[in-house]
Image: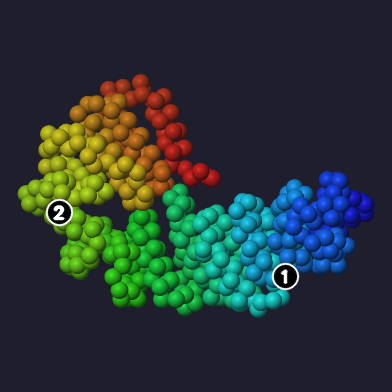
Amino acid sequence: MDESVGTLQFTTIGDIIKKHREQASLSITQLSNLSGVHKGVISKIELGDTKRPELRTIKAISHVLEIPYQKIVAHYIDVEKRVETLKELLLEAVQFANEPLVSKVAVKLLESPQEDTYNAIEQLYLLTKNLTETAFQLLLYKIIAQYARERGVPPYVAKSLLQIYLIERLDLKQMEDSFKAGEEILYYMDFLSQEEKTTHYFRMGLQAFALNKYKQCIELCEAGLALEATETELKARAYLAMINSYYFLDNIDAVQRHLDVFEKFRYDFVADATKTTRGIVKARLKEFHPAIPLLRRCLDEVDKDIKIHVVIELLDAYFQTEDMDSIAELLAREEEFLPDSPQTPYKHVSIGIYHQLKGNYMMRKGHFDAGISSYVTSLQAYGTVNAKEEIIKCTADIFSHFSNNCKSTDSYFADMIHLVAILVKIASPKDA
């Protein structure tokens, strides 16, 4: 065996302190004066008589000797068994953004002989929940889930998987994968509190809607509604997602029935959403005479956050009634209704639909380059959330208009190939 490896393997905290003290040409007495730690304490640490020195003592000595804190902690946790000290070390490792050290301290905490398995897992879970650094929350929840699974503690398998899902579902490019992970949690629902169950049902319902899984959206939202007796904003938003799902499934009776309940929620977005949905329903029923004036009023009255949805329905109604002048007037007001910073998949898709419809209009008016530009913007919006069905439909529109509007498709063939290559890149997940 290499001697240096053997020496490194058996290095103690005392060895590290003594080595750095001697390199600094300090006596134990001098180090004591500089650090405020009694020289007898320092001597015992260096000799190995004190196996688990206080953390504040090690910090004071390390500061004077300029020992990299992460280096001393890596050795300190090999001998430390006190849960409260390990929790303190874990928080500091997070502060230093040292992922390997965070993992190592977390496992030490879970394996502490001072706590039974359930309590150790619970303490780490509660600590993790209070962190603000999402990346480290995700890391620690995964450690907890694996440890709890191996030790047969299903409540914390369920709780950790739920927290992992709630974080990962925010990655709009990976919604399909996180939704599948959310489905696994459904097998652990008996181990979750009622609040956790309703949160999971509603969040999955909203995600199902964003993924065009309308039947699943309805099932999940109904499961949450059966459990949630109080009025919450999440409940109201899940109710709206359920209504919109019924709309896309062409169950207009259900839409109208549930709207009567939904409009009683007392949140700012409810009145606008109810008014807009009623106008959209009339347009879907081809009752354009009352629908268009109602939607135009909505466009002037509702919050900017939902104007884009009103515009899409108006554009569709204008196309069906061949009212090209009204389409031109609406497009001229673009700055009034395009979202400034879309946050939800539904919003990104809505922006994509708008630009696709705009592209269709430009093509019909013979503005070929402007039409292509709108299509590209549309596909960029779809690509943000990897909306594959919408990408396919938009691409079909592009090829259709190439065919219908170009006198010589050959002259645009190279541009088409280049465009498709760009769109494939846009639509692909980052890690594909």
Q: Is residue 280 left or right of residue 123?
A: left
Which of 213/93 is in front? 93
The residue drawn where x is 71% and y is 57% is 59
Q: Three-letter amino acid code at disc 1?
A: Lys
**What residue is at 19 percent from the left and 36 percent from the top?**
333
Q: Residues within 10 Å of mark 2 (few under 14, many from 20)?
A: many
**Mark number, residue 81:** 1
Q: Is residue 422 above or below residue 122?
A: above
> In this orientation, which residue lies closer to the viewer: 225 or 291?
225
- Say what secondary structure mark 1 lies in: loop
Vertical placement of residue 336 versus 244, above or below? above
Colouring = rainbow
Q: Is 353 displayed left or right of 257 in the figure?
A: right
Label 1, label 2: how many angstroms apart (C-alpha)?
65 Å
Residue 113 picture location, percent across and down: 71, 75
Q: Residue at x 24, y 62 (%)?
A: 267
Note whether residue 154 is visible: yes
Q: Is residue 83 left or right of residue 266?
A: right
What amino acid type is highlighted by mark number 2?
A: Gly
Say which quarter of the image contains residue 252: bottom left
Residue at (30, 61) in percent of width and height? 237
Determine if residue 180 is in view: no
The mark found on residue 279 in the picture is: 2
Mark 1 or mark 2, which is nearer to you? Answer: 1
- Labels 1 and 2: the sequence-earlier one: 1
Q: In the rendering, at what x and y percent does residue 366 appear? A: 22, 26
Label 1: few (<14), some or many (≥20) within 10 Å? some
